[in-house]
Amino acid sequence: MAAAAAAAFDEAWYRETVPRVMELVSPRLPQRDACALLAVSPWCHRALVANPKLWEVLDLREMKKAGDRLISALSLERYRHLKVINLEFAQDVDDIHFFCLKEMGYISLQELEFLNLNACQKISDKGIEAITSLCPNLQALSIYWIVGLADLTIRHIVKNCKHIMDLNLSGCKNISDKGMQLVADNYQGLKKLNITRCIKLTDDGLQEVLQKCSSLESLNLYAVSSFTNKAYEKMGSLANLTFLDLCGAQNLTDDGLACISRCVGLTYLNLTWCVRVTDVGVVAIAQGCRSLQFLSLFGIVGVTDVCLEALSKSCSRSLTTLDVNGCIGIKKRSRDDLIQLFPFLRCFKVHS
């Protein structure tokens, strides 16, 4: 009798309590932990599979045999409403896997919003064409450090994905102004663009983007030293810009920075190694960009305490990160000195 009662209790526990617990806990679990729980018991399996939100993300980041895992996962019913696929630094994924997905026919990624292929070095233009053809509603694409990709890649992307808002091309060194022209012509609602180390780009390509993608909120030009004031001066028209990384902009002068100061919503500005900038340019930023939270002047020898005094008048309550290391013209740059000017500073060193 007691054994039967205990069995009934266990049955009710697994049937009623386990699903409720899984419903509460599973949204907080990393997906890999959730997948491990699938094998714990049939009750856990059913409870987890029944939670559709849990299977909107497929995280294969840094995993081995990621290409085979991708195909296997997309064959399962629970992944039919994917919104995110993350293959960042994944191993053993190449064009063949994307060709296979396309040939399978029944695979649908219509709801996919974000595809992260960062550092998947074996993928070529043809692989990009295959995978993007399956996800026409993609909004964000990151192909950082796939150095073999070029302008043909951009042509495939703009043909297959009409709704891109966030595009990360960092490290794609073979993309030229032709690629930027395609971006500018097809993604005029673009919000975020990262062209870090896209060293073939010139003012002409960047200007096309700045003129046509006027809704940009984030622009990362880290380590692209070829641009000049001809392009920088166009940035003042980006009314929605909040993030701007100009690290290593060797041709940026005070005139260009004065135009950038019209981006009054800037909260993040990286001017590391912008060696031609002086107090004049930074004072212009202080007067125009009064919501700065992050500012790096690292390595700029042409700035002095004058620019910090100007910044303290407008940004003393907003700045939480300020790097003036290597700014030998600034005499009062100790932590105590900076705290007196900017009481909410929490980070004093961005670059090491």
Image: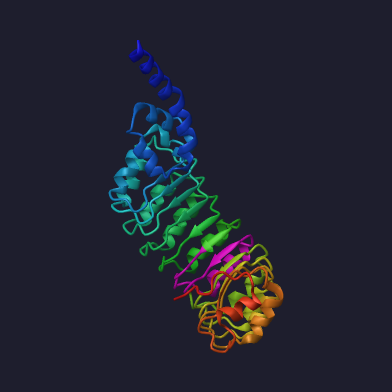
Most foreground residue, 133 or 338: 338
From the viewer's perspective, is residue 8 above or below residue 92?
A: above
Q: Is residue 185 magenta?
A: no
From the viewer's perspective, is residue 343 above or below residue 6?
A: below
Q: Where is residue 229 drawn, in percent x and y?
A: 59, 79
Relative horizontal placement of residue 202, taking residue 45 as reference (left or right): right
Q: Where is residue 4 drawn, in percent x and y?
A: 35, 13
Q: Is residue 207 magenta?
A: yes
Quarter of the image where the N terminus is located: top left
Residue 128 visible in rendering = yes
Labels in figure, total:
0
Q: Where is residue 319 drawn, in percent x and y?
A: 62, 70
Quarter of the image where the C terminus is located: bottom left
Most foreground residue, 23 or 69: 23
From the viewer's perspective, is residue 111 above or below residue 318?
A: above
- Asked which quadrant contains residue 49, the reply is top left
Residue at 64% of width from left, 74% of height from top? 342
Q: Where is residue 300 drawn, in percent x and y?
A: 54, 84
Residue 51 visible in rendering = no
Magenta extent:
194-223
Residue at 40% of width from left, 53% of height from top? 128
